[in-house]
Amino acid sequence: MSGQQINYEKSCISFSKNVPRWKQDELASLLGVRRVDKHDKYLGLPTELSYSKDEAFRYLVDRVRKRTQGWRDKTLSTAGKEVLIKAVVQSIPTYVMNCFELPKHLCHEMHRLMARFWWGEFGEERKIHWVAWEKLCASKKEGGLGFRDMHLFNIALLAKQGWRLICRPDSLLAQVLKARYFPQTDFMQAELHKGASFTWRSILKGRDLLRKGLRFQVGNGENISVWNDPWVPLPYRFRPFSLPMQGTEEFKVADFIDSEAGAFWLHGLLNLQPGKHPTTLLDIWFWDMIEALDGEKLEYFLMALWVVWMERNNMVWKGSYFNIINMHAWATSFLDDYKNLHKRQGHKARRTPIKWSRPPRGRLKINIDGSFCADTGSGGVGVVVRNYEGTCMATFARTVQYAQSAIHMEAEALRAGLLIAIHQDWKEIEVESDCVNLVNALHVDGDDLSDIGRILDDCRSYWFH
């Protein structure tokens, strides 16, 4: 089919024990290839593993030994040794580890050879290993050097094969393994039966690691058990921490989903009925909404999506609660601000740079600014303090990993500037900001229930400190 021809000198044939020897010789002669008792390797991998696993994979240790011994006579820095171990030695068994679980003692033997090379030796004279190899395998953040623990790396690669079976069930490999080992169930529920190949046994070893990190992605929730299946987006366990309440032992996640009311979209300007657009796929629902809405409703819909995402982040990272009324108020307010901003920008001329103006003599000016990136949810604050002559008296800059909005960062910058003044015991100060919304918010009477209300309360109290 490919136009290639068989190389009979490199080809050989082996038979099962049920084929008589005379028949084996006859078939080999007809095919024009050599008869062998067994194939040692195919594409670099052992083809038969019914015999000793140590004997089948011993060649990997020999290759590691050959590499490290060939480098010992060379004068290498510790950095050079680190590169050679990570880039060359530890990559030798990677191809095999993708398919088979190596015996632990062979992994430890490879560790021993790498440790001897790392610490150095001359002939039969061995140097002291001052730190255990397991500690060197820790990440550099944890005080190690980031070398691989070959056994754990082996299990991780096998888990990757299991993940491929889950993600690509239509692949040839997945179909063959399913027909052979789990025809009536899925990969995660497959059981190990007697007579399974070493390849399948190895993949199941990786499945044990997969189970520690897999959780369900909730669609309609009809097949997800509330108490027994991993579905809660919390690390390590992915299950509810509370004990099952009486009468809810058999509950599915779908029992907690109100498909009629619709946990926001039914309220506000849109009045969307979930039943009119039934789907469990977010992208399909999104494009359905794009086609169904227009004008102000479409603009509101897009802003509402952003508000839902921000509220979700606040619930996950800040422990807030879901408040439909506040969310719709935010969506309306943000949309109005967006329209007003772009309306002004569309008609105004190019803004000329504003030159810094000095404060009155004897007074310090505190310039503040904040930044916000909606894509990452991160931000930053900056503060510069200068005197009448323009001499910089203090500076401050800090990144904020979980920012809420641009005005939130402006408010945090104001609070930081005032705290610097209090710490330095500066009495005569003035604060300058380019955020009109922040300045207006400072002059609002009464309780400020916005997300920066408490920050502004702090700033007011600092101002009269």
Image (spheres, grey):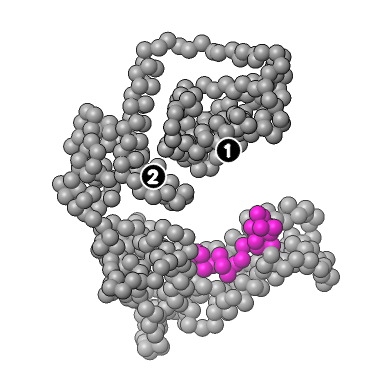
Q: CA distance from mark 1 to mark 2?
A: 21 Å
| Local secondary structure at mark 1 | strand
* Above or below, 144 relative to 379: below
Q: Is residue 141 magenta?
A: yes
Given residues 110 and 420, the one toward you in this image is: 420
Magenta span includes 378? no
Read off the magenta span: 136-159
Residue 271 pos. (x, y %): 20, 40
Which amino acid, mark 2?
Glu
Of the image marks 1 and 2, the number of the one nearer the N terminus:
2
Residue highlighted by disc 2: 311
| Residue 173 appears anywhere in the view | no
Q: Nearer the viewer, residue 145 or 100?
A: 145
Q: Name the residue at 71% across, 16% down.
A: 362
Mark 1, residue position: 399
Question: Which mark lies nearer to you, 1 or 2?
Answer: 2
Locate the N terminus by quadrant. bottom left
Q: Is residue 142 left or right of residue 37?
A: right
Residue drawn at x 21%, y 51% is: 261
> Which of the 4 image quadrants contains residue 35?
bottom left
Asked if residue 374 lies left or right of residue 272, the reply is: right
Residue 332: x and y in percent read 31, 32
Give the residue type that dot 1 points to: Thr
Numbered disc total? 2
Screen quadrant of the C terminus: top right
